[in-house]
Image (spheres, rainbow, N blue to C red):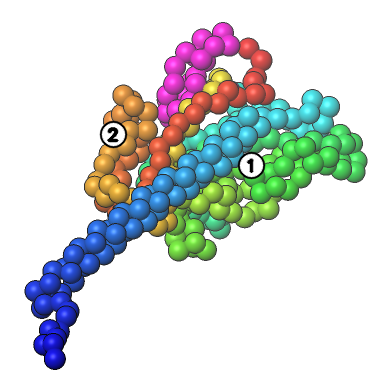
Amino acid sequence: MKNSRSKGFTLVELMVAVAIGLLITLVVTQAYINGIGTQQAQTGISRAQESSRFAFDNIGHALRKAGFRNPRSQGADFCSNAAPFRLNALNDQSSITLSSAEFSSSSGNPTATVLNSSDVFRIRYYGEGLTNSPFTPDGTITDCQGNAIASNVRVEDTYFIAADSNNDNEPALFCHSTNTWAAVALVPGVESMQLLFGDDTDLNGVTDRYVQAANVSSMTNVRSAIVSLITRTKETSAVDRSTWTINHFDSYSGGSADAGATFTAPADGRVRQHATFTVALRNICPI
């Protein structure tokens, strides 16, 4: 009778196999985690860019609409070099009075807290449609909340950055309209907004300089505007989580008079996007 020997793995071989299996599992798991992190970061960048595009569309449309009035309609124009101008703005605000003339403080008027020393701007315009009674609007001119405006109605839309209480207090681009007397969050994730205005100081129809709102010679002389926005994601999926400083307008710092032109992003893990664009204003007052 043959003496059979038992076959199998030794304890050492088993431990080596388990160690190799664990190492492979660790490598695969780490690769999976890195892939998920990269995907989340890319998704965050896309969302921040999307917020920038939506905000630019809203702001660009608003600035081009400023001062619109059908010459045949009722209502005074905006070219008398006296308030109310077609455009008004304030830089580095902490709070504003939404419904009062030229942002001046007035008891009983709603106020809003502005985030990150952002700039605020207000446009004024009339609607479009029948120029006599019953002044039915044709829908071509709407307020910032999408409501059609009649040709005899003057509207003031105020754009600012504030916390959205309906979205976990995330920052957002808001607009307050005197057509509805309400402020609505238009674009989520907009964290900081700064503007420089193209000032035609010698009234030759050409922009001579770009300055903050406080230094514009007259709002009737504004020909264009540079808008700078910083948008962020709600999720903390950024690969780089360090603090970094963003200059809204490159070499322009603004100094203490325009401290909001420099934004320091906290190390909170959110993906941020900085973008600028220039918009030429329409409805220019005659020189």
Q: Is residue 246 visible?
A: yes
Q: Which of 176 and 142 is in front in this view?
A: 142
Name the residue rendered at 27%, 47% in the picture: 240
Element type at mark 2: helix
Picture disc at residue 256: 2
Question: Decide: marks 1, 2 in contact (CB < 8 A)?
Answer: no
Which quadrant of the figure has residue 206? top right
Name the residue rendered at 67%, 24% in the picture: 283
Rendered position, 277 above or below 98 = above
Picture disc at residue 156: 1
Numbered marks: total = 2
Rendered position, 208 above or below 269 = above
Left/right of residue 137 with respect to residue 144 in the rendered view: right
Name the residue rendered at 10%, 78% in the picture: 11
214 drawn magenta = yes
Q: What residue type is labelled 1?
A: Glu
Crowding at dot 2, Cα within 10 Å, few <14 / some 14-19 / many 20+, comes out as few
Rendered position, 20 above or below 266 = below
Rendered position, 96 above or below 13 = above
Q: What residue type is labelled 2?
A: Ser
> What separation in Å lies between label 1 and label 2 (alpha carbons)?
30 Å
- Residue 205, position in %: x, y? 58, 11
User: Which residues are the magenta region?
Assistant: 196-220
Element type at mark 1: strand
Q: Earlier in the sequence, mark 1 or mark 2?
A: 1
